[in-house]
C-alpha cells in the first residue's frame, strides 16, 4: 500500500498549491480537508465559522481527516488547524508521510492579508494572532516526519524540496 504524502503547516504556507504541484509530478490526486468540508457543507468556511462556530468546523475537520486518511498514494493538503487534535495527526501518520511546511509570521501575513476567507485572521492584530497560533501549534507541527522551509520560495521550489526528500529517502515510486 502506497503511503499518502500529507502537508501540514500554517495558513499561507502554500500547502494547497504545493499539493497540486506534487500531485501533477507524482501522477496522482490531491485532496484538501478544507475542500472536503466546503463540498460536504455546501457553504464556504467563513460561513461555517459565522453560523456554527469554530468547534463545529473542527468536528467537520475530524470527519474529513478520518475519511481522507484512509486513501492511499494521494497528496493530502490539511487545513492549518488540523494538527491541534492529536488524534488527527495519529490518523494521518498511520498511512502517510507528514511534511511540515514552515513559514515565519511576517511571510504568513504577506501571503494571506488579502484573503478574507480565513476567519481566524479577521482581526485588528493579525500578525500577533499569527505569532500566537504558530507558537501554540508548533509542537504539533513538529511531529511531522520532515520539515521544509517555504519562506521566500516559490511553490515550485518547495515542491522540488519535497521531491528531493522523497527521492533521497526512497519514500514513493516516482513516475518517469
Ligand atoms: C485554519 C486554516 C484554514 C482553514 C480555516 C482554519 C486554521 O486552512 O482550515 O480557516 O485554523 O489554521 P489553510 O491552512 O489551508 O488556510
Image: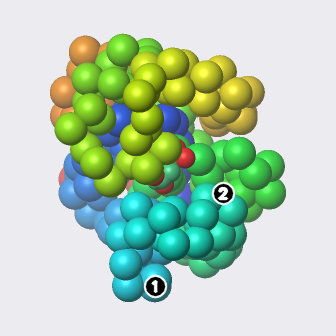
Residue under the image location 60 percent in, 29 percent down: 133
Q: Could you say where residue 17 lies in the image, as x and y percent from the top left?
A: 26, 47
Q: Which residue is mark 2?
A: 92
* Res 149 seen here: no
Compare residues 81 and 99 and report the one nearer the observer. Answer: 81
Q: Is residue 155 left or right of residue 68?
A: left
Q: Is residue 128 visible?
A: yes
Quarter assignment of residue 156: top left
Indicate the quadrant containing the N terminus: top left, top right, bottom left or bottom right. bottom right
**In the picture shown, does residue 123 fall above or below 50?**
above
**In this orientation, which residue lies closer to the viewer: 12 or 72?**
12
Q: Image height check: is 175 above or below 68?
A: above
> How many discs appear?
2
Q: Reply above or below: 76 against 67.
A: above
User: What is the crowding at mark 2: few (fewer than 14 residues within 10 Å), some, or many (at least 20)?
Assistant: many
Q: Position of residue 118 (x, y in %)?
A: 39, 48
Mark 1 or 2, nearer chain start: 1
Judging from the image, what secondary structure is the residue with disc 2 in?
helix
Task: Write down the residue under mark 1.
Answer: 40
Q: Is 108 located above or below residue 119 in the figure?
A: above
> Where is residue 45, by image quadrant?
bottom left
Query: How far across and down, in percent of the image, does residue 64 sit?
Result: 58, 72
Residue at the (35%, 35%) spot, across then down: 12
**In which image quadrant can residue 115 be found?**
top left
Amino acid at each position: 500500500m502506497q503511503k499518502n504524502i500529507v502537508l501540514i503547516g500554517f495558513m499561507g504556507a502554500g500547502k494547497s498549491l504545493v499539493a497540486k504541484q506534487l500531485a501533477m509530478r507524482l501522477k496522482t490526486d490531491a485532496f484538501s480537508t478544507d475542500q472536503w468540508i466546503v463540498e460536504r457543507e455546501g457553504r464556504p468556511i467563513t460561513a461555517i465559522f459565522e453560523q456554527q462556530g469554530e468547534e463545529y468546523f473542527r468536528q467537520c475537520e475530524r470527519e474529513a481527516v478520518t475519511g481522507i486518511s484512509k486513501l492511499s498514494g494521494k497528496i493530502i493538503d490539511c487545513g492549518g488547524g488540523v494538527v491541534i487534535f492529536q488524534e488527527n495527526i495519529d490518523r494521518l501518520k498511520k498511512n502517510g508521510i507528514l511534511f511540515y511546511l514552515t513559514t515565519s509570521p511576517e511571510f504568513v501575513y504577506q501571503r494571506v492579508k488579502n484573503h478574507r476567507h480565513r476567519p481566524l485572521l479577521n482581526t485588528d492584530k493579525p500578525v500577533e494572532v499569527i505569532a500566537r497560533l504558530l507558537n501554540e501549534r508548533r509542537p504539533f507541527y513538529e511531529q511531522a516526519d520532515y520539515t521544509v522551509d517555504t519562506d521566500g520560495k516559490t511553490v515550485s521550489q518547495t515542491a522540488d524540496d519535497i521531491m528531493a526528500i522523497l527521492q533521497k529517502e526512497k519514500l514513493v515510486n516516482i513516475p518517469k
